[in-house]
Amino acid sequence: MSASYSLVQWNPHKRTYDIILVASIFAFIAAFFVFSKLSHRSPQAISDEILLLRATAVCGFTLLHITLAIGPLARLWPITAPLLYNRRHLGVATFLVCAFHATLATLFYGAFAGVFPLRAILAAGDIRSISGFPFEWLGMLALLILATLAATSHDFWLKWLSPRTWKSLHMLIYIAYALITAHVLLGAMQSERTTLGAISLLVGAATLSMLHAAAAIKQRRTDLAAEREAATWMSVANTTDFIEGRAKIVCPRNRESIAVFQHKGEFHAISNVCSHQGGPIGEGAIIDGCITCPWHGYQYLPETGASPPPFTEQLARYEVRIQGTTVQVRTTPQTTTPERPA
């Protein structure tokens, strides 16, 4: 954190992360290049320029998959949450690799067209044909989105745009992913003689879809559990509103009312219905350590809801908690039966 903005707020973690990230990118491209060189010998040899184009393309697309996978992974397995810390660095690196690939492609295919290279690239193709579709436009649109997200990744833009607007803007990453997938399908995949590329695309998209679906299901379950938890607790009153030995009564919807007593500085909750003739327990008081029904004097211990020996009556008891200065009671009775006093 800082009182002013700086380009990058470096710390040992960020430096280590970026060093590993940059080294991994160069290692990936080098390994792809060398492996492809060894795999495609004469007469199937591929030029170094094409290999470099493929290496940067595969690297950028792989980085994009990793970037999109980190969010759901962190929700599914908290141990991966630290990866979120520098995810924006990974996103910027993805853009830089994709931009390098786009620059190479533009220069390689458009430098000798007699016009501005970018114009030559974007003017190619026929929108009416699948095999001749101008897939370069799709890649260019995706690159513009990645550039926008990289440029606005700094906390300055998060503050200036507001978190909600910033988050909505950065959801465009999924549009970029769809555009790049279409760019590959209508471009490189058209000349592929094997199904390896198509299978890789399918596996990547399926993996991301399953991760996001699993994370969404887990989040929904967590939200429902929280809603159920919140629904089972009712606020009774402020702790200072209670009178020692007297009760506050709450009436949960479609359930019997509950009497919450303060006794010796602690709070206890039992059914508000006396087991004798249904008298209003909460209108009584604690006398000689026992909650006493105002109708006929039936008594119950506040800690257990049980009548003192030799009587055997037992009222339902409820869990009580203090949230800040508010006394809350769980609207469902406790299922365990307390030990009866000797």
Image (cartoon, grey):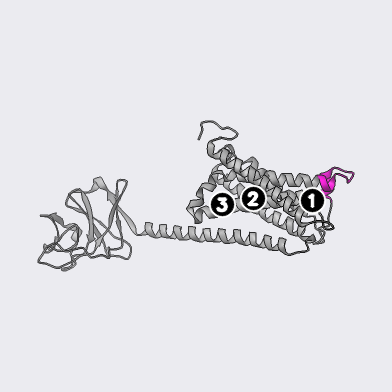
Classify 274 as above or below 161.
below
CB atoms at circles 1 and 2 under 8 Å apart? Answer: no
Residue 63 badge: 2
Q: Amino acid at mark 2?
A: Leu
Mark 1 or mark 2, whichever is nearer to me: 1
- Quadrant containing the C terminus is bottom left
The boundaries of the magenta stretch are 107-123
Residue 185 picture quarter: bottom right
- Please tell me which residue lies in front, 262 or 340: 340
Question: What's the amino acid at mark 1?
Answer: Ile
Q: Secondary structure at mark 1?
A: helix
Determine the residue positioned at 70% across, 57% down: 181
Q: Please state the horizontal and vertical placement of residue 82, each as a whole percent of the image.
A: 51, 47
Q: Secondary structure at mark 2?
A: helix
Q: Residues within 10 Å of mark 3 (few under 14, many from 20)?
A: many
Q: Amino acid at mark 3?
A: Ile
Neighbour tally class for label 2: few under 14, some 14-19, many 20 plus, Cα within 10 Å: many
Q: Is disc 1 surrounded by few (<14), some (14 to 19) or many (20+) residues within 10 Å?
A: few
Say whether residue 108 is magenta.
yes
Instruction: From the top left corner, tell me how far across and down residue 63 is, in percent.
Output: 64, 50
Report which residue position mark 1 lands on: 50
The residue at which mark 3 appears reads as 70
Between discs 2 and 3, the one toward the N terminus: 2
Residue 43 lies left or right of residue 280; in this view the side is: right
Instruction: Name the image quarter holding residue 129.
Output: bottom right
> Is residue 165 among the parts visible in the rendering?
no
Q: Earlier in the sequence, mark 1 or mark 2?
A: 1
